[in-house]
Image (spheres, coloured by chain):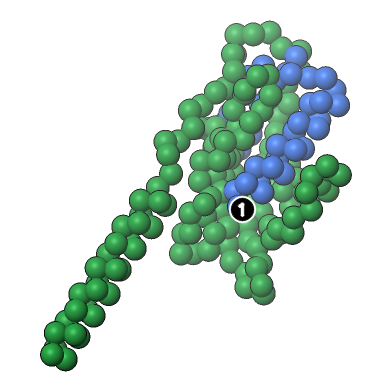
Chain colours: A green, B blue
Amino acid sequence: MIGRVAYALILGVTLGMIIAGAAIYVTGQRGNAPAPARGDLNISYSLALTVTEAFLAAQINNPPPPSPDEPAIERPKIRNVEVRLLPDGTIQARGETTVQGVTFPVRAVLLPRVVGNRIQMAIVSGRAGDSGCRQ
Amino acid sequence: MIATDVEQTVNRRLQVVLADHALEVVALEPGDGILKIRLK
């Protein structure tokens, strides 16, 4: 009797772990990567800005204050950000943040896109901590 | 959340600059270590 109960418990726990793991795996998968949208290079233009990695890192390390119409949300601050601008158009940002006294690394990959004559930043991936928690 | 924060920070800066100068983005030219933004 005790053996059957123990067997059922172990079987239940094992099945639970498998099901929970599968659920985390499935829900953790992101959709397809956003398609590049670099605009039209054949259109004439009047000005070209060259954005550097140091410029972007400075913007992220010193974020602008939220506008008055934005809701006041306390979010963890990202510090010591380093940015890499890659030839494929993606922006890789690495830094660290502190939540409840615990500091851990964070990483985000963004893809700037031209949509309606404006720049939109599509989020390719985001990770927090060494364990690779996906956003 | 972290990626969203980075995205919002970068995007807010860019949009403010573009709106202040009534500029529209025509195209992006990514490179190694730089990103060129063509405007008109």
Closest to the observer, B32 or A114: A114
Closest to the observer, A87 or A91: A91
What amino acid is at disc 1? Ile
Instruction: Say if B3 sits above or below B26 in the image.
Output: below
Measured as percent of width and height from the top left, residue B31 is found at: 57, 30
What residue lies at 29% left-to-right and 68% top-to-bottom? A16
What residue lies at 62% left-to-right and 35% top-to-bottom? A121
Q: Quadrant of the N terminus of chain A?
A: bottom left
Q: Is residue B29 visible?
A: no
Measured as percent of width and height from the top left, residue A73 is found at: 74, 55
Would residue A34 be found to the left or right of residue A75 on screen? left
Looking at this view, name the residue that lies furthest to the front: A1
**Element at badge 1?**
helix
Would residue A97 be found to the left or right of residue A69 on screen? left
**Residue at the spot of label 1:** B2
Q: Is residue A82 visible?
A: yes
Measured as percent of width and height from the top left, residue B13 is found at: 77, 37
Q: Sort mark 1 into few (<14), some (14-19) or many (20+) by Cα contacts within 10 Å.
A: many
Instruction: Say if B10 sits above or below A76 in the image.
Output: above
